[in-house]
Image: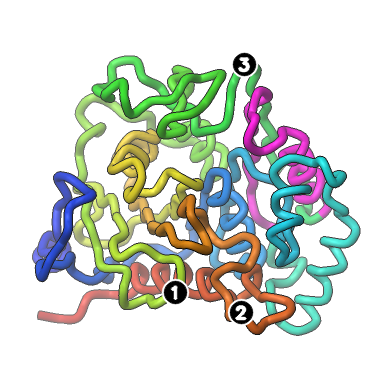
Amino acid sequence: MRTATLLAATLVATVGHAWGDERPDDLPPLALNDTAVSVIGISSGGYMATQLAVAWPSRFSGLGVLAAGPWSCAEGSLGQALGQCMDTRDGPPDLDALARRRRDYQARDLVGSDAAFADLRAFVWHGNDDDVVDPTLGEALATQLSDWLADPDEQLLHQHASATGHGWPIRTQDRDIPPEQLGDCQRGGGTHLLACDTDLAGTALSWLHGDLTAPTEKTANAGELLAFDQAEFGARGLADTGYLYVPDSCQDGGCDLTLALHGCAMGAEQIGEAFVRHTGLNAWAAANDRVVLYPQAETSLANPQGCWDWWGFAESTWQLHPLHDTRQGTQVSALIAMLERLMEAPASP
């Protein structure tokens, strides 16, 4: 059965050591469902999540974005990314220009259609005290999505959080999370996992996928965190190793999938397993037959904070207009390939 194939993957106990010659196994095919896939990301991962949903809306039913601004905000420019898409010292993003950019891409079949995107459910969250990505950028994203969704009153949940900084709020009550793996709720910092006693993972997943079963003590740890080799996906900016959380109930396939994208300085290279273990996503996944895929970005001279590519650094240097935010984007293509692998059925023994 599929169990043997799945459990052959490397179970991760620690991270940050050299693998040497003992690299993790490839990402396994798990015969997952393709009808209830969500993508959720924070900061640069939030920008990438929207890029994925716009490029391939038919692949997703839900989009969750934390602490990020509108789709394609940087338009391929690092200067614009810094001056309009993190703070707004150069003015707010021009949503009309971004809409024209999307229409141009649609005309060239580089992103999905209006009709395909219009059916998505979307969740947008931002801390009001965020000093890394200006909270007005979350407002701009919500406005942008409202123009693209069929019925934003029914499909879009936009939340602000008072006295909350830049990061992913988590519930710490009754959870064994080392204090050094937490950031301050209002000031942010550290791992950017914010000790706010807010179960943001549950709020987001429940909005994107309807009524879900809340985690219990029995289901909270009913799964395994596995490492897999990302090298085969061959995209610039990907780390060597990614992570996959597989509930015990999903070892024989037929489960749903959530793709979770860390933010800058939140990858395993910088903060160990804090993000892949403590967002709260795994507990909700175990209670609701949902696998969680945690791809990993890496640091480099071009990308010293280990961000996902939302301004074009991972594309060829000769490109005047990088296509990082389209179906041809190297990281977009790699992430979609990971999803497709998980949808495949394992080979017969």
Q: Position of residue 265 (x, y in %)?
A: 45, 45
Could you say whether the residue bearing mark 1 is in a helix, strand or loop? Answer: loop
> Residue at image x 17%, y 52%?
17
User: The residue under label 1 is which amino acid type?
Assistant: Ala
Above/below status of 136 relative to 247: above
Could you say whether the residue bearing mark 2 is in a helix, strand or loop? Answer: loop
Of pointers 3 and 1, the one earlier in the residue sequence: 3
Q: Is residue 129 left or right of residue 187?
A: right
Spatial CA span between label 3 and label 2: 41 Å
Is the residue marked by circle 1 packed among few (<14), some (14-19), or many (20+) residues within 10 Å?
Answer: some
> Which residue carries the number 3 mark?
163
Of pointers 3 and 2, the one earlier in the residue sequence: 3
The quadrant of the image that shows the C terminus is bottom left
Is the residue marked by circle 2 packed among few (<14), some (14-19), or many (20+) residues within 10 Å?
Answer: few
The quadrant in which residue 334 appears is bottom left
Examine the rendering and report whether any part of residue 159 can be seen. Answer: yes
The tag on residue 92 is none
> Residue at image x 24%, y 47%?
247
> Residue at image x 40%, y 55%?
257
User: The residue under label 3 is which amino acid type?
Assistant: Ala
Residue range highlighted in magenta: 119-147
User: The residue under label 2 is which amino acid type?
Assistant: Thr
> Which residue carries the number 2 mark?
317
Above/below status of 151 relative to 280: below
> Which residue carries the number 1 mark?
235
Spatial CA span between label 3 and label 1: 38 Å
